[in-house]
């Protein structure tokens, strides 16, 4: 005997599916957001390391010119094949272009491309064995304030994370994530 399913049984399956689907999608997109956040933390750590590497390499050359050192290349210029041993010599610590601050920010932004530009990049030069000041002022990297052979270049990079899931975004809003790194000024 071939029994026909009641028409109410098909409707019951649709109602159960309609109740379970939003919870399933919330969990799925929540996992995607968690994955994006973990990836952002990893990328931000790499951005801080890269910014610290660039800053430590260039901090010793602040204010130098080709008159002082023929191997200097302005921060805004590119190192060409004609001058392979050249090093970047930022004109100042802070400023819009041709500065250590601009070079460090560009280095950090190269690493966080999937998430847009970094929110803030802070750096400080301190003697070995000390910690940066709470406001992370950039002026500590001026030649008068550092001893090149005994300075540490500190970098802190901040980035804002916004979840793509609307419910999670409303619950937690945006998160500011921070990574930092240090390197010895060479």
Image (cartoon, rainbow, N blue to C red):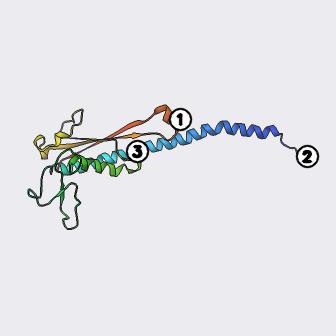
Q: Mark 2 vs mark 1: which is more N-terminal?
A: 2
**Residue 82 pos. (x, y %):** 19, 68
Residue topped by disc 1:
167
Crowdedness of circle 1 by 10 Å Cα count: few (<14), some, many (20+)?
few
Crowdedness of circle 3 by 10 Å Cα count: few (<14), some, many (20+)?
many
Q: Mark 1 vs mark 3: which is more N-terminal?
A: 3
- Can residue 9 be seen by looking at this rendering? yes
The mark closer to the camera, 3 or 2, is 3
**Residue 113 pos. (x, y %):** 38, 51
Residue at position x 47%, y 40% from top? 163
Residue topped by disc 3:
40
The Cα–Cα distance between marks 3 and 2, rounded to whole angstroms, is 61 Å
The Cα–Cα distance between marks 2 and 1, rounded to whole angstroms, is 50 Å
Q: Which mark is residue 58?
A: none
Residue 134 in the image: above or below residue 45? above
The kind of secondary structure element at disc 3 is helix
Q: Mark 2 and 1 residues: CB-CB less than 8 Å, in contact?
A: no
Residue at position x 15%, y 51% from top? 61
Q: Please name whichever residue, 125 or 159, is drawn nearer the observer in this view of the structure.
A: 159
Residue topped by disc 2:
1
Q: Is residue 162 left or right of residue 91?
A: right
**Quarter of the figure with residue 25:** top right
Q: Is residue 10 left or right of residue 142?
A: right
Q: Mark 3 vs mark 2: which is more N-terminal?
A: 2
The kind of secondary structure element at disc 1 is helix
The Cα–Cα distance between marks 1 and 3, rounded to whole angstroms, is 20 Å
Q: Mark 3 and 2 residues: CB-CB less than 8 Å, in contact?
A: no
């Amino acid at each position: 005997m071939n029994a026909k399913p009641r028409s109410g049984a098909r409707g019951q399956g649709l109602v159960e599916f309609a109740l379970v689907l939003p919870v399933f999608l919330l969990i799925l997109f929540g996992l995607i957001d968690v994955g994006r956040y973990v990836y952002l933390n990893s990328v931000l750590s790499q951005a801080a390391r890269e910014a610290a590497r660039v800053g430590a390499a260039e901090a010793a050359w602040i204010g130098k010119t080709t008159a002082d050192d023929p191997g200097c290349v302005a921060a805004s210029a590119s190192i060409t094949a004609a001058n392979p041993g050249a090093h970047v010599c930022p004109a100042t610590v802070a400023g819009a272009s041709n500065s250590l601050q601009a070079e460090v920010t560009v280095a950090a932004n190269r690493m966080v491309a999937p998430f847009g530009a970094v929110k803030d990049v802070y750096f400080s030069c301190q003697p070995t064995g000390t910690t940066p000041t709470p406001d992370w002022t950039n002026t500590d990297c001026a030649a008068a304030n550092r001893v090149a052979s005994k300075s540490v270049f500190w970098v802190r990079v901040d980035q804002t994370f916004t979840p793509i899931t609307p419910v999670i975004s409303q619950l937690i809003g945006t998160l500011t994530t921070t990574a930092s790194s240090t390197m010895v000024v060479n």
